[in-house]
Amino acid sequence: MARIKIGVIGASGYTGSDLVRLAACHPGMEIAVLTANSHAGKAMAEVFPHLAHLKLPTLIKNEEADWSKVEAVFCGLPHATSQAVIRELPKHLKVIDMSADFRLRDAAVYEKWYGGAHQALDLQKDAVYGLTEHYRDDIKTARLVACPGCYPTAVLIMLLPLVKAGLIDASDLIIDAKSGVSGAGRSLKQNVLFCEAGEGLSPYGVASHRHSPEIEQEISRAGGAQVIVNFTPHLIPMSRGELCTSYAKLKGGATAADCVAALEKHYKDEPFVFMAPKGVMPSTQYVRGSNNVMLGVYADRVPGRVILISTLDNLVKGSAGQAIQNFNLMFGLPESQGLEQVALFP
Ligand SMILES: NC(=O)C1=CN([C@@H]2O[C@H](COP(=O)(O)OP(=O)(O)OC[C@H]3O[C@@H](n4cnc5c(N)ncnc54)[C@H](OP(=O)(O)O)[C@@H]3O)[C@@H](O)[C@H]2O)C=CC1
Ligand SMILES: CC(=O)N[C@@H](CCC(=O)OP(=O)(O)O)C(=O)O
């Protein structure tokens, strides 16, 4: 069967380059177009020496791309820049956006958290939220999929089945999250310099992180009532990986064992979501480089509360891997194709 020609917009970034790394081994994809901004004109091998052995197109500007033979585009641009670029793409292209631009369904909420009016509301209304395990049927027929943020993916995969089953109180959620530094992207920023982030653990976006409304939107959709969550992210000195610990109040006499049973039931046929083995705590080390999410549920010593731990690789299930999982669905391919990588341990 002919391979599907794909393009990657923002291939000189971390999500874009991890997409290229995965796409290069995907039997159903041919990488036809790679775009960049400041790196346009360079060979991928120059920008990413770990990809040097692959025969890849040279990085070009978006406006130089010939999309006529391409069928799908992955977009790894900074949020608030994707919408104007995606709006101008030819309509025959299916688009899988890794930025935040099309995730929020309410234009006013988008404007409040991203500091400006949305420039492609006509596309926004038909965009499908790309949390694969929860929106599979909608993703299959979508033209534009808005992949979730890395933190929301980790948090929602844990919490949505428990909210839907009525086991936890969606109005009382505390989420403590930690991310490796690649989560902040590849462009130079003072707070991710080695001297600033290399040896410490730093909270940021306290009570103000833009993933809060994204998590709230999806928990509210699952639970039926508008919720507000307490979400605190931290930057941790490692290159990739993310671990989220959520603290929840159990409802109606439910127990931690009920939560385990609900998650096992919900994800029993899922290729990428696993409970931590008995006696093992989820760790970023067990998912690094893979498209997997590892979950762990623990009874709290505080009566009636439960501790919920989820971990993933921010560049794989948190962005490029989930984007490919969605591409597979959109093109009728086996959902796990090209995503069979086992975690890189140790
Ligand atoms: N990093 C992560 O773990 C995750 C990131 N995301 C989201 O994915 C998107 C990409 O993130 P990430 O890959 O980390 O970001 P990077 O900063 O690493 O890469 C951004 C890319 O966009 C290009 N670019 C930057 N500004 C412009 C512009 N004005 N016009 C056109 N192209 C531009 C850059 O090109 P050049 O370098 O050539 O200038 C680069 O290719 C973001 O929206 C991010 O929030 C989502 C989930 C996880
Ligand atoms: C460590 C770090 O800085 N992480 C990023 C999250 C990356 C991500 O998933 O964000 P998007 O919503 O932009 O796609 C942040 O907190 O903004």
Image (tube, rainbow, N blue to C red):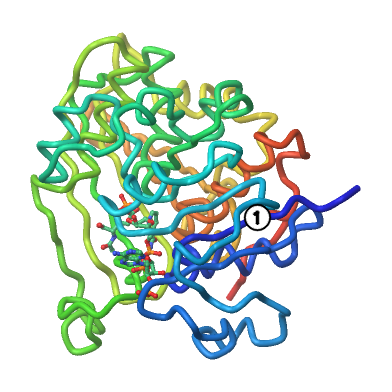
Vertical placement of 63 versus 197: above or below? above
User: Which residue: 32% across, 71% down?
Assistant: 181
- Nearer to us in this view, 164 or 167: 164
Return the x and y of residue 174 as percentages of the image width and height. 20, 38
Which amino acid type corresponds to the residue marked 1 in the rendered image? Ile
Q: What element carries label 1?
A: strand
Q: In which quarter of the image is ligand 1?
A: bottom left
Quick check: can you spot residue 281?
A: no
- What residue is disc 1 on? 6
Residue 329 x/y as whole percent:
67, 35
Q: Residue at x 53, y 84 (%)?
A: 48
Q: Residue at x 65, y 55 (%)?
A: 6
Quadrant in which residue 77 is drawn: bottom left
Single out the residue that lies furthest toward the right. Answer: 1
Asked where in the image residue 153 lies, by quadrant, the reply is top left
Observer-nearest of 64 and 196:
64
> Percent x, y for residue 316?
53, 57
In the rendered image, residue 52, in percent from the top left (x then y), is placed at 65, 87
Query: Pointer 1: residues within 10 angstroms few (<14), some, or many (20+)?
Result: many
Closer to us: 127 or 247: 127
